[in-house]
Each structure stands twice: as C-alpha cells, then as structure tokens.
Amino acid sequence: MDKLHFTYEDIHRTAKDIAERVKASGFDPHMIVAIGSGGFIPARILRTFLSKPILAVGISYYDDEDRPTDLPRKVQWIEEAERKLAGKRILLVDEVDDSRTTLEYCIRELMRHEPSEIAVAVLHDKDKEKRGVIPDEVSRYFAGLRIEDRWVCYPWDADDIDAHDEAARKGV
Ligand code: G4P
Ligand code: MG
C-alpha cells in the first residue's frame, strides 16, 4: 500500500488548525485526554493552542506475552478517573481515525465516568469503511485532514528523520 508521510511541521500546522476550529465551535474543554501512544504528541501540540491539562490513557491489543488479543484492554488509565472526569468537558485526542475500533472503545470507557460532554479530535481521518462507530453522545468531531486509506508514516516513528522528511517533501 502507498504510504503517506507527514513531517512534524505538517502535524503542528494541522494541530493548530484543529485548535482554531475547536475554539470557533465554542467548545471549551476542561481537559484533553490523549490516547497513547499516537495521541500523545498531537495532544501536546494542541495544548499549546488550547492551554488545557492533558490526561493520558493507553490501550493495547497485545497481552503481557506480546500475543495479539481480539479485544482491547486498558494498560494505563486515568487514576481517580471518576472524580476527574465527572461533569467535565473532554476533548479526546488521537493521531488517526482508521478502523475506529480504538476510538469507540475509549469513548465508551470515558462515558462511564459521566463527563458532561465529549468531543473527539484526530489529526487524520481515513476515508474508508469503519468497523467502529462514534457514539451519539460525542457532541463534536474534528478531523485535521481527511485522507485516503493509505498507511500514514508519522515523524515520531522515523528511524531516519531526514529521509522521512525527504519522502514527505516528495509527496509520497
Ligand atoms: P482507531 O480507532 O483510531 O481507528 O484505531 P485502530 O484500532 O483502527 O488502530 C489500531 C492501531 O493502528 C492504532 O495504534 C492506530 O494508531 C494504528 N494505525 C492505524 N492506521 C495507522 C496508520 O496509517 N499509520 C500509523 N502509523 N498507525 C496507524 P495503537 O495500537 O493504539 O498504537 P500506537 O501507535 O498509537 O501506540
Ligand atoms: Mg494510536
């Protein structure tokens, strides 16, 4: 499958654009919840523009012996989540909306803590048939860019960042 490369600068600009749309929408989150690990860096950049605290959650599809599992499981979750999230407006952040499975799982788990509102922001939403759904309780959905169904190479995964940026420059 063809790949798509984005540089840190691309991602910074996309995050700024998302933040501007969040603000323009009138949504004022109490906090950002980052889905690790892909959502960590986007959440941090969003914080520059939205100035909100970040909480992190981690999901894994691997068990302790590194064997793939069918269902996701929480490997890291917000301590005292109930107290922190109840009645609060949350902006849930991840890097990519691919199958939507992880997103749906995280949204449903967060909803159990009874926030007053959940909005979702992703850098990239792949134009494809999704396996998960964004539950109706999600009030707003912000996608930085809608992209083709291609494998995205993120700069934080790059072994050679210069080669990565060169590939991004060439538009591959
Ligand atoms: P979704 O709900 O956000 O659509 O996620 P999905 O379960 O479909 O994705 C499973 C994993 O695959 C996620 O990572 C997601 O970030 C990753 N993924 C999907 N498409 C791409 C892509 O085009 N490029 C890259 N680099 N990753 C992709 P994860 O298991 O949560 O791991 P992590 O990398 O976020 O730590
Ligand atoms: Mg991810």
Image: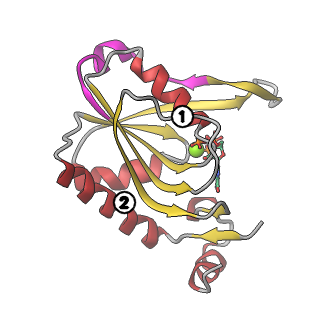
Task: Measure the alpha-carbon separation of dots 2 and 1.
Answer: 23 Å
* Label 2–label 1 contact, CB within 8 A: no
Q: Which residues are magenta?
A: 74-90
Q: Mark 2 belongs to which amino acid?
A: Ala
Instruction: Please give the label number shown on residue 149.
Output: none
Q: Quadrant of ligand 2?
A: top right
Q: Residue at x 63, y 75 (%)?
A: 164
* Circle 1: element type: loop
Q: Residue at x 61, y 48 (%)?
A: 98
Nearest the camera: 135 or 39? 135
The x and y percentages for residue 108 are 48, 22
The x and y percentages for residue 112 are 41, 14
Image check: 134 left or right of 27? Answer: right
The quadrant holding residue 133 is top right
Image height of 150 relative to 50, above or below: below
Q: Residue at x 61, y 73 (%)?
A: 161
The x and y percentages for residue 69 are 77, 26
Instruction: Please give the label number shown on residue 133.
Output: 1
Instruction: Please give the label number shown on residue 15.
Output: 2
